[in-house]
Image (spheres, rainbow, N blue to C red):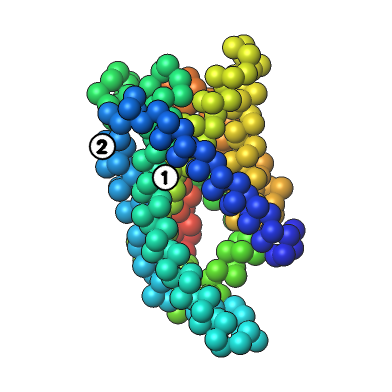
Amino acid sequence: MTLTLVSIFTAVLSFSLLGLQIVVAAVAGARWQALRQYARRSGVVALVVVGLGVPATVVTVLHLDLTAAAPNAPAIVTEIVGVATRLALLVGVFLQIAFVTLNMVVAIGIADRHPFPLLFGRAQRLSHLGYAALGGLAFGVGSAYLFSVLSVGRGSLIVLSEKMMPGVDTHAIAHLLGVTLPSFLGIAVAEEILFRGIMQRWLVKRLPATTIGTWGGIALTSFVWAIAHVANTDDVAFKVAQIFVSGLLLGWAANRFSVEVSIVGHAALNLGAILAVAVGRM
């Protein structure tokens, strides 16, 4: 898939997810009286989740250099776009806090079973969280190994983003552990709340209450989640397959136990993958 196609696809998907966030905000506003009791703890989680991505935001703001990616563009254009991008990143931090908070409260209101039982003082077996952590670590390490063996490279947009920060060595151990890892942990939590907490639970609730209906909701959510990662590697088919399979496992865990379980599994998956890459570079 060429850079142009990936860019267009990513832009369309980004606007679609933004539209979903707006719908979530509207639902939260309409049902705020019933959901406001969950806002405080959800807000604390949102602060932690977004805070994990702050190092990546700071590095980007400080080192962004658009001339490295577009050397032939007029200087005034790259300067204006650079300033606008930095402002968007900073404003985006506050928007992310609001979105994660609203996503959590809406996820709680979608179905009868609470998606975050441990956080809100309800029954949650710690063994389920432990199994999810072990399974996620194994899947993450295994995925990183397969990517290495099959020589799967970074996606075109990722390569372009690295060119925009010429002074940053994104492959250095310090960057992997101090910037990439916390960002990926925060992303894992945010994605699970949105995809498994809202999208999957909404689909499962509206599809027939059968095994086929349940797995249909899990599969549809996993597919959307998988295609959201097409820009991550240069082997789109392999990446989509890997994310889709992991999505089915996380979706099953979220439906069978809780979204907290799928959050732990997803975070452990990202942790395992990053640690495997870091060890491989030592």
Q: Quadrant of residue 208?
A: top right
| Residue 270 screen position, x and y as percent | 46, 47
Q: Position of residue 175 (x, y in %)?
A: 40, 66
User: How many neighbours does mark 2 have within 10 angstroms: few (below 14), some (14-19), or many (20 or more)?
Assistant: few
Determine whether 46 is above or below 60 in the image.
above
In what element is the residue under mark 1?
helix
Is label 2 in a helix, a strand or a loop? Answer: helix
Q: How far from the left and from the top, in percent, is residue 201? A: 51, 25
Most extreme residue toward the top is: 210
Disc 2 and disc 1 in contact, CB within 8 angstroms: no
Left or right of 78? Residue 36 is left
Residue type at mark 2 is Arg
What's under tag 1, amino acid-wise?
Answer: Phe
Residue located 30% across and 31% down the image: 36
Disc 2 to disc 1, C-alpha distance: 14 Å
Look at the image and tell me whether residue 125 can be seen. Answer: yes
Residue under pointer 2: 40
Question: Vertical placement of 16 versus 111: above or below?
Answer: below
Q: Position of residue 221 (x, y in %)?
A: 60, 33
Label 1: few (<14), some (14–19) or many (≥20) C-alpha neighbours in 10 Å = many
Q: Which residue is mark 1?
A: 99
Question: Which callout, 2 or 1, points at the residue further toward the start of the chain?
Answer: 2
Q: Identify the residue shown where x is 58% and y is 52%.
A: 14
Q: Is residue 230 above or below residue 241?
A: below
